[in-house]
Image (spheres, rainbow, N blue to C red):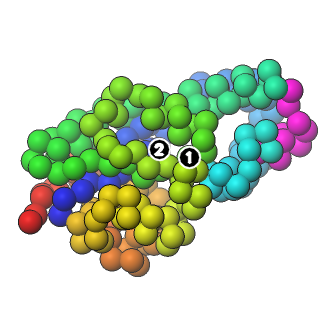
């Protein structure tokens, strides 16, 4: 085992805080269950890079935002995803000290990926791999194969943590040791092997 591969959202970062969700609702002028259902249902194509931010937010809002409005929405959305999960980051750092290499594999669209990639508190993670650059998303098998190629690693060289069961199952199906993330202490159980 040479790589500790981590999902980003709700693993290395905290869930979107309520205040940030409310800020997105305020900027978009929409709120409630239907809005958030549309936000998530439209997300895979955006995460994969199949659609632009403008196309995504037009689908979510039911109307095309102006360029200025779109910039404000993107900024608010990105801000909601950059709250560090300090215990997980500390545990990953301990794993690095034990000899494991750290990498990120996240479903994220271009604009969110750029915001994540610029965080100094993720400096220990290299590479930081995003679905928008791969043009495939978890849990699609092609996404995991692309990540292994990027890491120049075989399935047995990687342990992967994700907060979504479907992504864990998909990784296991191609031979990656994958675990459902529930607690930062899980990283402490991962040991490097030859």
Is 105 rendered above or below residue 64?
below
Is 163 rendered above or below residue 193?
above
Q: Which span of residues is magenta-colored? A: 56-66
Q: As drawn, is 50 to the left or to the right of 6?
A: right
Identity of the residue furthest to the right in this view: 63
The kind of secondary structure element at disc 2 is loop
Is 8 rendered above or below residue 163?
above
Pointers 2 and 1 in contact (C-beta within 8 Å): yes
Crowding at mark 2 (Cα within 10 Å: few <14, some 14-19, many 20+): many
Q: Which residue is mark 1?
A: 108
Closest to the observer: 132 or 93? 132
Which label was assigned to residue 28? Answer: none
Report x, y in % for residue 127: 35, 46
- Say whether residue 65 is magenta: yes
Number of numbered callouts drawn: 2
Name the residue at 68% across, 30% down: 74
Closest to the observer: 167 or 137? 137
The first of marks 2 and 1 along the sequence is: 2
Crowding at mark 1 (Cα within 10 Å: few <14, some 14-19, many 20+): many
Q: As drawn, is 106 to the left or to the right of 191?
A: right
Is 39 rendered above or below residue 114?
below
Q: Which residue is mark 2?
A: 9
Report x, y in % for residue 102: 27, 47
Mark 2 or 1: the one toward you: 1
Query: In terms of image quadrants, where is residue 92?
Result: top left
Name the residue at 38% across, 58% down: 150
Report x, y in % for residue 37: 73, 50
Can you see residue 128?
yes
Name the residue at 18% across, 63% down: 1
């Amino acid at each position: 085992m040479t790589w500790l591969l981590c999902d980003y959202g709700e693993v290395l970062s905290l869930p979107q805080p309520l205040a940030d969700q409310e800020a997105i609702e305020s900027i978009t002028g929409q709120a409630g269950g239907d809005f958030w259902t549309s936000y998530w249902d439209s997300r895979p194509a955006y995460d994969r890079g199949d659609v632009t931010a403008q196309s995504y937010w037009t689908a979510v809002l039911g109307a095309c935002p102006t360029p200025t409005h779109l910039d404000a929405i993107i900024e608010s959305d990105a801000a909601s995803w950059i709250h560090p999960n300090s215990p997980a980051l500390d545990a990953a750092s301990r794993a690095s000290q034990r000899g494991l290499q750290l990498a990120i594999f996240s479903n994220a669209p271009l604009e969110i990926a750029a915001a994540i990639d610029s965080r100094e508190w993720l400096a220990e993670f290299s590479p930081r791999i995003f679905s928008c650059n791969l043009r495939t998303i978890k849990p699609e098998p092609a996404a995991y194969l692309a990540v292994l190629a990027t890491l120049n690693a075989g399935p047995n060289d990687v342990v992967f943590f994700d907060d979504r069961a479907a992504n864990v199952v998909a990784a296991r199906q191609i031979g990656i040791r994958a675990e459902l993330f529930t607690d930062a202490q899980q990283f402490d159980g991962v040991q490097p092997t030859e």
